């Protein structure tokens, strides 16, 4: 079962993902995608690490997300946090990132165990000023759509509250 949590910064996505892992009753593997290359990210990584129970397995995976997901046994509750930072890593290190995106989406959709994936919704904000910013926003929008298309449940988080997002074609039927 794939649950996709999407929303703005500080909307409660990561907190909910951790709470889901705690309530699952299963062993948890947490795939962290952040590369702490500046003080802000180092602080965020430290805060997120402190929120996770010490018995959880943490896999730090800034690039090869598909491989990391595929390596987690289905008996493990898997949390991937987050696609936003992972895609930014790909933009930095792997300019032709389509192969990595396809591998990650395939691994997520093919997984039989309970999985929670976190990502930001960046298409509702200010129009990016640069071509690189617009390219990133568009690429993340496509990645989010691909993951949501295979998710059993997609929730939009705002202020710690969730709104269920349904397939529009099911609503239009």
Image (spheres, helix red, strand yellow):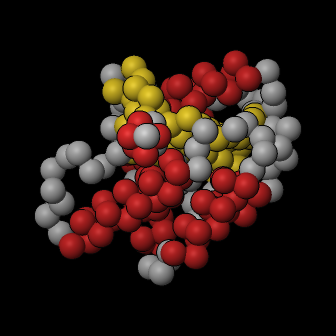
Quadrant containing the C terminus in the rendered view: top left
Q: Which residue is at 66% across, 53% downward?
A: 108
Task: Determine the image quadrant of residue 169.
Answer: top left
Describe residue 103's horizontal placement relative to residue 33 as left or right.
right
For the residue pair 110 and 43, the one nearer the viewer reads as: 110
The x, y position of residue 84, in whole percent, is 44, 52
Taking the view exactly as shown, the residue that stands out farthest to the bottom is 96
Residue 34 is at least partly visible in this image: no
The x, y position of residue 141, in whole percent, is 37, 57
Q: Which residue is at 68% across, 27% downward?
A: 21
For the residue pair 153 and 22, the one nearer the viewer reads as: 153
* Up/down of 70 relative to 78, above or below: below
The x, y position of residue 35, in whole percent, is 52, 56
Taking the view exactly as shown, the residue that stands out farthest to the front is 173
Q: Which residue is at 50% across, 57% downward?
A: 146
Task: Determine the image quadrant of residue 65.
Answer: bottom right
Describe residue 145's horizontal placement relative to residue 21 as left or right.
left
Q: Which residue is at 81% across, 27% downward?
A: 26
For the residue pair 10 and 70, the one nearer the viewer reads as: 70
The x, y position of residue 45, in whole percent, is 52, 42
Describe residue 66's horizontal placement relative to residue 157 as left or right.
right
User: How many callouts does the rendering have?
Assistant: 0
* Up/down of 97 relative to 76, above or below: below
Residue 102 is at least partly visible in this image: yes
Quadrant containing the N terminus in the rendered view: top right
For the residue pair 59 and 155, the one nearer the viewer reads as: 155
* Up/down of 3 relative to 98, above or below: above
């Amino acid at each position: 079962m794939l649950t996709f949590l999407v929303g703005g910064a500080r909307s409660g996505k990561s907190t909910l993902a951790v709470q889901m892992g705690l309530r699952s009753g299963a062993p948890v593997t947490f795939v962290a995608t952040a590369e702490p290359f500046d003080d802000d990210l180092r602080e965020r990584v430290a805060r997120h690490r402190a929120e996770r129970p010490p018995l959880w397995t943490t896999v730090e995976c800034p690039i090869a997300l598909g491989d990391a997901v595929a390596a987690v046994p289905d008996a493990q509750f898997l949390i991937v946090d987050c696609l936003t930072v992972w895609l930014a890593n790909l933009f930095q290190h792997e300019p032709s990132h389509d192969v990595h995106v396809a591998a990650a989406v395939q691994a997520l959709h093919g997984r039989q165990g309970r999985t929670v994936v976190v990502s930001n919704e960046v298409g509702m904000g200010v129009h990016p000023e640069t071509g690189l910013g617009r390219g990133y926003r568009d690429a993340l929008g496509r990645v989010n759509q691909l993951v949501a298309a295979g998710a059993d449940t997609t929730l939009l988080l705002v202020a710690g509250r969730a709104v269920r997002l349904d397939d529009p074609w099911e609503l239009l039927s």
